[in-house]
C-alpha cells in the first residue's frame, strides 16, 4: 500500500507542536493513516502525577478509534526535547507497540526520522490471547 510519507510525517510534526510535556521536556508527535484515508494525530500529554502520562501514539490511537477508524496502514512518530529539531529517530515504547499491534499488521510501516521500519521490526511478538 503506497502512501504519502511526507504528509504523514508533517502531521506527526504538527501534533508534536501541541505536546504537553512540562515535566520531561520531551515532545512527541504521532500520526496514523487509517485504511479509509484519514489521518489522526496525537501528542504526549503529561500529568503532575507522572505515571498518568499518555504517550503520543496511544493518544492518536484513542482519537482514531473514537472516530471509527480501527485499521491503520502507516504510522509516523517524531520526538525530541522541546525546542529541538527531531533529528534522531524516536522509537515507540513497548506499551505503545502493544497497542499499535492491535490495529496494524506486522508489515505496517512505522516512519521515523531518518528511516522507516515495520511494526514487526520493533515488536516481533506482541502479546495475544492465542485464539
Ligand atoms: N513518550 C511518548 O509520547 N511516546 C513513546 O513511545 C515514549 C515516550 C513520551 C512520554 C513522556 O511524556 C515523554 O515522552 C518522556 O518519556
Image (spheres, grey):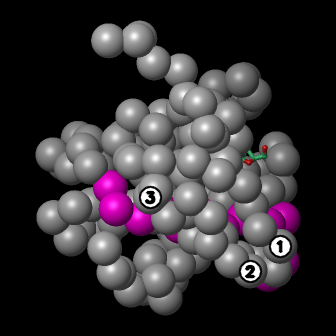
- The residue identified by callout 1 is 88
**Which of labels 1 and 2 is toward the front?**
2
Label 3 residue SS: loop
Picture coordinates of residue 89, whole percent (x, y): 77, 68
The part of the image, by quadrant, that contains residue 32 is bottom left
| Residue 6 magenta | no
The part of the image, by quadrant, that contains residue 91 is bottom right
Is label 3 within 8 A of ligand 1 (CB to nearest ligand atom)?
no
Q: Is residue 1 above or below residue 61?
A: below
Question: For residue 113, which numbered disc appears in the image?
Answer: none
Res 18 visible: no
Q: Main secondary structure of the magenta part?
A: strand
The part of the image, by quadrant, that contains residue 1 is bottom left
- The residue identified by callout 2 is 114
Question: What is the span of residues highlighted in magenta in the rendered image?
Answer: 72-85
Image point 22% across, 61% down: which residue?
35
- The residue identified by callout 3 is 108
Q: Quadrant of the C terminus?
A: top left
Image point 41% across, 11% down: which residue?
129
Q: What's the CA distance linking mark 1 and mark 2?
A: 7 Å
Q: What's the CA distance linking mark 3 and mark 2?
A: 17 Å
Task: Please tell me which of labels 3 and 2 falls first in the chain.
Answer: 3
Task: Please tell me which of labels 3 and 1 falls first in the chain.
Answer: 1
Q: Is residue 97 above or below residue 116?
A: above
Label 1 residue SS: loop
Q: Is 33 displayed left or right of 128 in the figure?
A: left
- Mark 2, Cα crowd under 10 Å, few <14 / some 14-19 / many 20+, is few
Q: What's the CA distance linking mark 3 and mark 1?
A: 21 Å
Picture coordinates of residue 17, whole percent (x, y): 59, 71
Amino acid at each position: 500500500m503506497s502512501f504519502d510519507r511526507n504528509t504523514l510525517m508533517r502531521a506527526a510534526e504538527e501534533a508534536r507542536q501541541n505536546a504537553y510535556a512540562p515535566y520531561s521536556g520531551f515532545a512527541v508527535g504521532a500520526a496514523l493513516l487509517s485504511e479509509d484515508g484519514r489521518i489522526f494525530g496525537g501528542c504526549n500529554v503529561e500529568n503532575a502525577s507522572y505515571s498518568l502520562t499518555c504517550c503520543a501514539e496511544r493518544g492518536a490511537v484513542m482519537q482514531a478509534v473514537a472516530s471509527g477508524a480501527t485499521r491503520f496502514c502507516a504510522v509516523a512518530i517524531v520526538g525530541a526535547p522541546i525546542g529541538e529539531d527531531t533529528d534522531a529517530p524516536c522509537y515507540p515504547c513497548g506499551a505503545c507497540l502493544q497497542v499499535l499491534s492491535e490495529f496494524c499488521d506486522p508489515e505496517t510501516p512505522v516512519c521515523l526520522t531518518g528511516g522507516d521500519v515495520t511494526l514487526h521490526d520493533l515488536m516481533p511478538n506482541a502479546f495475544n490471547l492465542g485464539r
